[in-house]
Amino acid sequence: MKILLINAHPDYQNTDRTINQLVQVSLQTIARVAPTADVEQLTLYNPKNTIPPITADVMNHPERVADTQQALIEQWKRADVILIMMPLHNFNVVSKLKDYIDNIFVAKQTFKYTADGSVGLLDGHQKVAYIQSSGSDYEHDLRYVNADFAPHYLRTILNFMGITKMTLIRAEGLDLIENDKSAIVAQTKRELTAYLTTTLS
């Protein structure tokens, strides 16, 4: 089994960040439940990892990033389980995750155009979980539910690739005064552990 763990936190080295704690819980759970799994980690904000932004230069000279882009596409395609871990930023995905998606959501690679519209080229066997941290409650607070763009965006992209299901795990309301942040994080860790245990067993 091949697992791709994508850390999309800009402050990826800060162990106090909720997403980084959840990354560690994921790695520990995988090591316990599926010790023979092949785990690839992609930390999007690590400068060692090249995630080309789509610029005029790239659009006019795609050959300059072709090898890097192809490597990202192949890494995505060969994963059986994909974990996307991200803090919500201004209601949407962080910029590096958008850059990453722009590199793997490519016609004739992960989807194709047909007379009836676009069709995904992936076979749908991949299991994808999106783990999102947020300061506010985007699931229950009526002020924010309509601003819950990031999960909807990712579901749309995945569906266009041929992946029809995405598990959403939230650590939300972390900045609300009335909430117990440590309890929320602990509950999310339990939920993530349960998901991985079921998925990898």
Image (cartoon, rainbow, N blue to C red):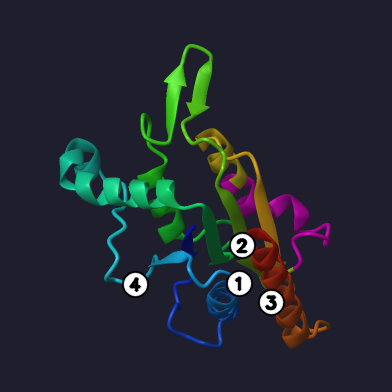
Point 50% across, 24% down: residue: 118
Residue closest to the far front: 36
Q: Amino acid at mark 1?
A: Val
The CA distance from mark 4 to mark 3 is 24 Å
Looking at numbered disc 4 in the image, what kind of residue is underneath it? Asn
* Residue on which disc 4 sits: 46
**Numbered circle sitting on residue 168:** none
Q: Is residue 120 left or right of residue 175?
A: left
Residue placed under numbered mark 3 in the picture: 189
Q: Quadrant location of the C terminus?
A: bottom right
Q: Reading the chain from its start, which is encountered first: label 4 or label 2?
A: 4
Quarter location, residue 144: bottom right
Q: Nearer the viewer, residue 126 or 65?
A: 126
Q: Which residue is mark 2?
A: 200
* Image marks 2 and 3: residues in contact by CB distance under 8 Å: no
Three-letter amino acid code at the position of disc 2 = Leu
* Span colored in magenta: 137-154
Foreground tag (4 vs 2): 2
Q: What residue sits right under mark 1 in the picture?
A: 33
Counting residues from the start of the chain, the first of labels 4 and 1 encountered is 1
Q: Amino acid at mark 3?
A: Lys
Q: Residue furthest top?
A: 115
The one nearer the camera, 79 or 5, is: 79
Q: Position of residue 149 (x, y in %)?
A: 64, 51
Per the image, label 2 sits on a secondary structure element best described as helix
* Precedes in sequence: disc 3 or disc 1: 1
Measure the C-alpha gap from mark 3 to mark 1: 15 Å
Q: Is residue 146 left or right of residue 48?
A: right
